[in-house]
Image: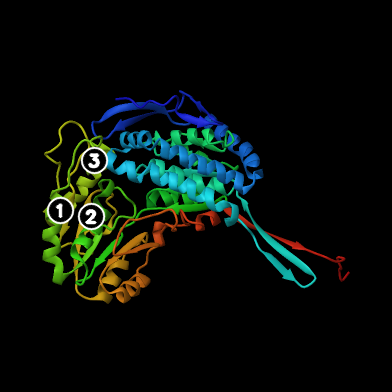
Amino acid sequence: MKAQPQASHFIDGEYVEDTAGTVIESIYPATGEVIARLHAATPAIVEKAIHSAKRAQKEWASWSPAARGRVLKKAAEIMRERNRELSELETLDTGKPIQETIVADPTSGADSFEFFGGIIATAMNGSQIPLGGDWAYTKRVPLGVVVGIGAWNYPQQIACWKGAPALAAGNAIVFKPSEVTPLGALKIAEILIEAGAPKGVYNVVQGDRETGPLLVSHPDVAKVSLTGSVPTGRKVAGAAASQLKHVTMELGGKSPIVVFDDADIDSAISGAMLGNFYSTGQVCSNGTRVFVHKAIKETFLSRLKTRTEAIVIGDPQDEATQMGPMVSLAQREKVMSYIDKGKAEGATLVTGGGIPNSVTGEGFYIQPTVFADVTDDMTIAREEIFGPVMCVLDFEDEAEVIARANATEFGLSAGVFTADFSRAHRVVDQLEAGTLWINTYNLCPVEIPFGGSKQSGFGRENSAAALEHYSELKTVYVGMGKCEAPY
């Protein structure tokens, strides 16, 4: 099983290699097999990519918004035509089941290109301001060269979520995928060239921890957009801020889901499972603290246990498989260490907690795990685990659960399940999070803004709001008469 690309990097419309860079091994998580070997970008590769982007950006920005939109919509069309191929690559890259990637990964990337391609002709309009005889006008202009730094959980989606608004606004982008999942972004870059984008307007460079700082600190970079962990976000935002660069930070979370006693229990269980087990729990917005009213706790846990133990774990390339492996051995070991802490600190293990018996070989599999009787001070209730580990906590009072839900440094997402819509809106108004759901969870269509508050980041992905973070406002005052001075 191989997925070796033509070369490690895609710069100025073609594949580029520099074997002087550190070797990056791409490992298929279901077997532990090395499926591709690439090289991290050397300083020369970084320089080449940014120079290419800087040159291409000026041409791209001179195109009309409608012309840029046609390219993005064509890229969306190509992605949909090749959805199966791209989904299979995403499964190899991440270990996620094909039944998931085929509906949630390249398709959402295509949605992003289509959406921004469709709105750009009107979304970047400015305003005209009458000032008596004089007047002024505003216009939105691109920032220049944007650096996108991706995470390993949704590599193709993130490559598009950052690329689409950046390109729509007239910027060029240099995108660095996670070294854990280096393959998908190269195909996105190929498709954009095929769709008619100028060479150099979307470049991909591979890299590790040494590559990111080279990109972020480059004087020709105007903006950095990162999807990653809070510690990484602090470092990147700090480095960008030292040079007054624009930043968007989409970081981690420890999000709450609140299930009131009048909720549809099966629906709430579905939401909790989507918010903990989808993508083997490797989703930043996951609702990993599930607060369940004491009156329905036992029923909730009983049904949750039955449904969790019925999840089909196996070969990600089998369309019957519902859960694949963790993305890497290191990530599985990290999650297992949290499970051990949960047990040691007195949480009740309802189900899971180990390696599934249904799979063999060297894959990085783990059982979907549920802990009950979790208290707010336990490690598993405070720290982001980023794996399929659900913590169920008890509550009785609305004010109490709101206070506890907010008692975290994170503020990415939150969910509420209740039949009382007055209460639903009242509660979400008080929950400290950037993206919230009522009676559902983890749905992120491109039409709505996505992002966090507090330590979960700032700026927004998706929707017309994203364009504000990839452009800046220019104001022009027009004097209609003779300029006078008092001296």
**On the rendered structure, is 144 left or right of 304?**
right
Q: Quadrant of the N terminus?
A: top left
Q: Residues within 10 Å of mark 3 (few under 14, many from 20)?
A: many
Please report contact status of discs 2 and 1: CB closer than 8 Å, yes or no: yes
- Residue 460 can be seen in this image: yes
Badge 2 marks a residue whose secondary structure is helix
Identify the mark at residue 307; answer none if there is no mark.
1
For image coordinates 36% across by 43% down, the residue present is 105
**Mark 3 lies on residue:** 324
Q: Quadrant of the C terminus?
A: bottom right
Nearest to the observer: residue 162 or residue 421: 421
For image coordinates 50% across by 46% down, the residue present is 164
Identify the mark at residue 330; answer none if there is no mark.
none
Sequence-wise, the earlier of marks 2 and 3 is 2
Nearest to the observer: residue 352 or residue 346: 352
Q: Amino acid at mark 3?
A: Gly
Could you tell me residue 284's position as x and y percent?
Answer: 34, 52
Sequence-wise, the earlier of marks 2 and 1 is 2
Q: Is residue 433 above or below residue 9?
A: below
Q: Amino acid at mark 1?
A: Arg
Identify the mark at residue 273; answer none if there is no mark.
2
- Residue 377 can be seen in this image: no
Q: Amino acid at mark 2?
A: Met
